[in-house]
Image: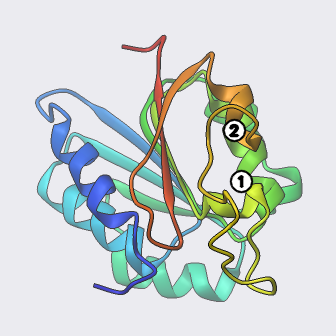
Amino acid sequence: MNPFYTHQEVLNKILESFDYSKSVHCLEFGSGEGSSSIFYKFAKSYSNLSVDCFEHEEDWMDNMSKKYKLENYNFNLVNWSNINYDELKIKKYDLIFVDQGNWNARIETIDKLMNYSKYIILHDYCYYNGFTPEIGYNPDSNYNNFGKGSFFEKYNEEFSISSFTDLYPPTLIFKSKKLF
């Protein structure tokens, strides 16, 4: 496994937990080998699973689409600064995976769609607590904090939040308190 794909195990576990005798709807914000390969595997196995992927880089999206597109796994080119979230709010989702290239767009995605999904997985959440590649890892910092005093404290009313791994880049799981 690629060491940067720290989200793969939890993504697999959540997708394995769904009842595919019913329709299952997922969104993927930011395509990549780590997440797209897993969504592809599940979409190929379960026709009741639909995945809509949103990507901003056309060449990258074309490459990923050629590799992973299926009838029930669609790729959409978007501009993160003017994506129409209202079109996505017409239904509820079982899972939203958030790992797009724009850091601000990640939080906007969560904020706009947080009441529309059972689970949200956020990859690389340490960035919001001050970690950047330029600064590097500081063992005395609390980059993995998602509780009191963290950037993510504002989401604790709507979600049960847990961190899947202490490895970098870490992955955060939001489980809706209202949609279960």
The residue carrying mark 2 is 152
- Residue 138: x and y in percent read 69, 76
The residue carrying mark 1 is 106
- Residue 10: x and y in percent read 31, 54
Q: Quadrant of residue 99?
A: bottom right
Q: Is residue 37 above or below residue 158?
A: below
- Which residue is at the front of the view, 74 or 35? 35
Q: Looking at the picture, which amino acid does disc 2 mark?
A: Phe
Q: In the current view of this chain or complex, which residue is farthest to the front?
A: 140
| Quadrant of image for the N terminus | bottom left
In the displayed structure image, the side of residue 174 where residue 22 appears, left or right: left
What is the distance, in whole Å, between disc 1 and disc 2 at their CAs? 13 Å
- Which residue is at the front of the view, 172 or 78? 172
- Residue 12: x and y in percent read 24, 56
The residue tagged with tag 2: helix, strand or loop?
helix
**Which residue is at a point 74% across and 27% down the rendered structure image?**
154
Looking at the rendered image, the disc whose residue lies closer to the viewer, 1 or 2, is 2
The residue tagged with tag 1: helix, strand or loop?
helix
Q: Residues within 10 Å of mark 2 (few under 14, many from 20)?
A: some
Q: Is residue 49 above or below residue 68?
A: above
- Residue 175: x and y in percent read 44, 29
Q: Residues within 10 Å of mark 1 (few under 14, many from 20)?
A: many
Q: Quadrant of residue 128?
A: bottom right
Which mark, residue 154? none
Q: Is residue 152 above or below residue 139?
A: above
**Which residue is at a point 32% across and 61% down the rendered structure image?**
39
* Sequence-first disc among 1 and 2: 1
**Which residue is at a point 32% across and 59% down the rendered structure image?**
71
Q: Looking at the picture, which amino acid does disc 1 mark?
A: Arg
| Quadrant of image for the C terminus | top left
